[in-house]
């Protein structure tokens, strides 16, 4: 049995993360990576969904080193048949904030200095009340939180869930407008065309056209036409 959830996120705080850095400008793309969503939704490091993450690997209360462990944390979701797609903005606006800071070498390296040279940067953030959409594919019923935290500022967002009905598994040519993680579906689908969304840790693709691939077809609750979501997606990582 396959369950598909259409999830909507509405921001209640400004959302910031550095999708790209252009000089002193740090820009937030209106796309949320599926790795980040897995952590925010509580699917990683949880007794309910993952029993393979050890206490030493826990990011819940303390992170002893700034080294991502995506493969160790997300592979258990494959074993449970849970997959989260990246999220795209369906309604959003951005705001540009300027911040300043001073030289703090004397704090970091205990260096003597007679200078206090201020510097600045600009952060482009997604404003509150912006809305995102994503899909969750699961082999079992999931209990997801109503409120989650996202981005560098741990911004608050409200999660609304709709369970999709009348799901059909089909094979053929199809297109999918939402963003996708190419590592998770390139080995099971022949991708003909796409647009690239450059962002770390893995650039995403959107407006994807796929030839002779398996997909789930279902009614889009928010639109009249049916939606075709690629099937057999799993978390995969570079060798």
Image: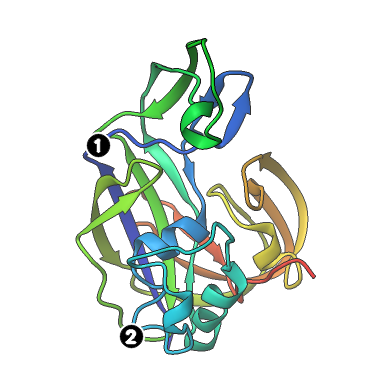
| Quadrant in the picture for residue 131 | top left
Which residue is at 69% across, 40% downward? 195
Q: Is residue 234 above or below residue 76?
A: above
Q: Quadrant of residue 214?
A: bottom right
Residue 46 in the image: x percent, y percent?
35, 79
Decide which of tag 1 and tag 2 comes sooner along the chain.
1
Asked whether disc 1 touches disc 2, contact meaning CB atoms under 8 Å apart, the reply is no
Mark 1 lies on a secondary structure that is loop
Q: In the image, is 116 to the left or to the right of 173?
A: left
**Quadrant including the N terminus:** bottom left
Residue at image point 38% right, 73% down? 43
Q: Which residue is mark 1?
A: 13
Q: In the current view of this chain or complex, which residue is farthest to the front?
A: 112
What is the crowding at mark 2: few (fewer than 14 residues within 10 Å), some, or many (at least 20)?
few
Residue 196, given in percent of the width and then of the height, sits at 69, 41
Placement of the C terminus among the 4 image quadrants: bottom right
Can residue 194 be seen here? yes
Does residue 147 appear left or right of residue 226 in this picture?
left
Q: Position of residue 143 (x, y in %)?
A: 25, 76
Q: Is any atom of residue 233 visible in this view?
A: no
Does 213 sit above or below residue 98? below
Name the secondary structure under disc 2: loop
* Mark 1 to mark 2 CA distance (whole Å): 29 Å
- The mark found on residue 47 in the picture is 2
Whole-percent x, y for residue 142 in the image: 30, 78
Residue 16 vs 213, above or below: the answer is above
The residue at 76%/71% (across/down) is: 187
Q: Residues within 10 Å of mark 1 (few under 14, many from 20)?
A: some
Residue at image coords 37%, 74%: 166
* Up-down relation of residue 1 to residue 176 (above or below): below
Judge from the rendering whether residue 57 lies leftward or rightward of residue 144; answer left or right: right
Q: Which of 140/104 is in front?
A: 104
């Amino acid at each position: 049995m396959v369950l598909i959830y259409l999830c909507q996120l509405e921001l209640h705080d400004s959302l910031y993360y550095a999708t790209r850095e252009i000089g002193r400008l740090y820009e937030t793309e209106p796309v949320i990576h599926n790795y980040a969503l897995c952590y925010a939704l509580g699917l990683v490091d949880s007794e309910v969904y993952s029993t393979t993450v050890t206490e030493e690997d826990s990011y819940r209360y303390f992170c002893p080193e700034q080294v991502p462990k995506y493969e160790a944390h997300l592979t258990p979701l494959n074993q449970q048949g849970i997959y989260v797609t990246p999220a795209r903005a369906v309604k959003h606006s951005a705001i540009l904030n300027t911040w300043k800071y001073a030289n703090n070498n004397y704090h970091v390296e205990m260096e003597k200095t007679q200078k206090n040279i201020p510097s600045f940067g600009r952060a482009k953030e997604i404003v509150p009340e912006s809305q995102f959409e994503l899909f969750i594919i699961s082999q079992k019923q999931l209990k997801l939180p109503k409120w989650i935290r996202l981005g560098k500022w741990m911004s608050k967002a409200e999660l609304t869930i709709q369970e999709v009905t009348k799901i059909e598994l089909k094979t053929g040519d199809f297109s999918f407008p939402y963003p996708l993680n190419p590592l998770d579906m390139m080995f099971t689908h022949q991708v003909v065309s796409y647009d690239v969304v450059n962002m770390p840790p893995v650039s995403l693709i959107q407006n994807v056209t796929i030839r002779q691939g398996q997909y789930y077809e279902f009614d889009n609750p928010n639109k009249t036409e049916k939606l075709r979501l690629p099937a057999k997606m799993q978390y995969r990582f570079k060798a």
